[in-house]
Image (cartoon, rainbow, N blue to C red):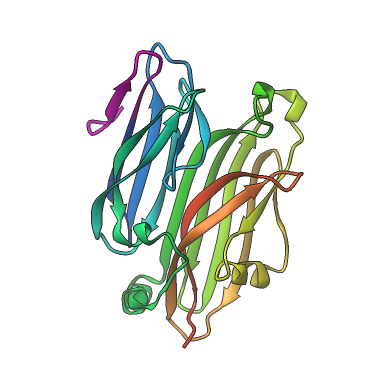
Amino acid sequence: MGRDAVPVDDGTYHFSYESWIRARANAFMYGRCIQVMAPTEKLRNHWEGVLPEAIARKGRPTTGGQDFIDKVNVHASAPLHYGNSDAKKDATYFAHKDELAKSEKRDSSFRQKIEETTKSTGRFLLESLYSFSAQLVAKDDDSLMDIDASFYSNFDGKIFKYELDYVMNSPSQKYGDTTLSVRFDGQELSRLNAISEKRWTMKPGEGQLSFTAAATAENQADFVDHTISLIDQDGRSIATLPVSYMLPTEN
């Protein structure tokens, strides 16, 4: 538990939640975490719009974060649902100002910073990180799936590279062969589906999925903040992950 973690004890569940901002190579990571505390061993949780709906366990917290190009943070709050009942509380966190818009957005105001950084260092990198556990089938504890995922967007001035690294395992052999597909949500994100020219599928174990796209104007890229969804074999979304990435500019 970090120094800024907020403990919660309602007499039934004992856990903590926290958020932070950390400077990275060319961006700022806005991170969040929900962690169980003794004697609680397992906790259903959903921090709306902040972290995916998940189940936190002892030694396996729900964590996530995404890069933003600048540090313009505000104090925000969102409902945090927890436990097997409809218990919830308004939980405050550090948010980037653009997160609160909750709408798909291409931001061309960062073109100059991306261009300058790319020219001086040879690349610009944005990353979104998530580690969580989710049920594939409601109320079926055997369907729990542990997922660690990193979504990268890298631009070297001419080529964009998109990469998803993941580790996905089910503690139960019953669901050990389950695969998940990745869906880029929204009209703007559908461009990634088009240029990838393939369906991304996450298989059990470790894996890496990637594709590239050429820049429309050298050294120029736009910043986008939106979501991807992990879809089960029945077409049901089991997790929605806020992500940051770059796209070729549109003049």
Q: Is residue 251 left or right of residue 196?
A: left
User: Could you say which is closer to the camera, residue 85 or residue 248?
Assistant: 85
Which residue is depicted at the point 44% across and 76% down? 221
The quadrant of the picture occupied by the N terminus is: top left
Against 240, residue 89 (above or below) is above
User: Could you say which is closer to the camera, residue 62 or residue 102?
Assistant: 102
Q: Is residue 201 left or right of residue 102?
A: right
**Among the 4 quarters of the image, the one containing residue 38:** top left
Which residue is depicted at the point 34% across and 74% down? 110
- Residue furthest to the top in view is 39
Which residue is depicted at the point 74% across and 37% down? 178
**Among the 4 quarters of the image, the one containing residue 40:** top left
Residue 12 in picture, x, y percent from top left: 40, 14
Q: In this figure, what is the number of numbered marks? A: 0
The magenta segment is 1-16
Q: Residue 7: say if magenta.
A: yes
Q: Residue 68: say if magenta.
A: no
Against 212, residue 226 (above or below) is above
Against 77, residue 218 (above or below) is below
Which residue is depicted at the point 31% across and 52% down? 95
Residue 97 in picture, x, y percent from top left: 29, 60
User: Could you say which is closer to the camera, residue 246 or residue 95?
Assistant: 95
Against 11, residue 139 (above or below) is below
- Residue furthest to the front in view is 86
User: Could you say which is closer to the camera, residue 86 or residue 204?
Assistant: 86
Residue 195 in picture, x, y percent from top left: 65, 72
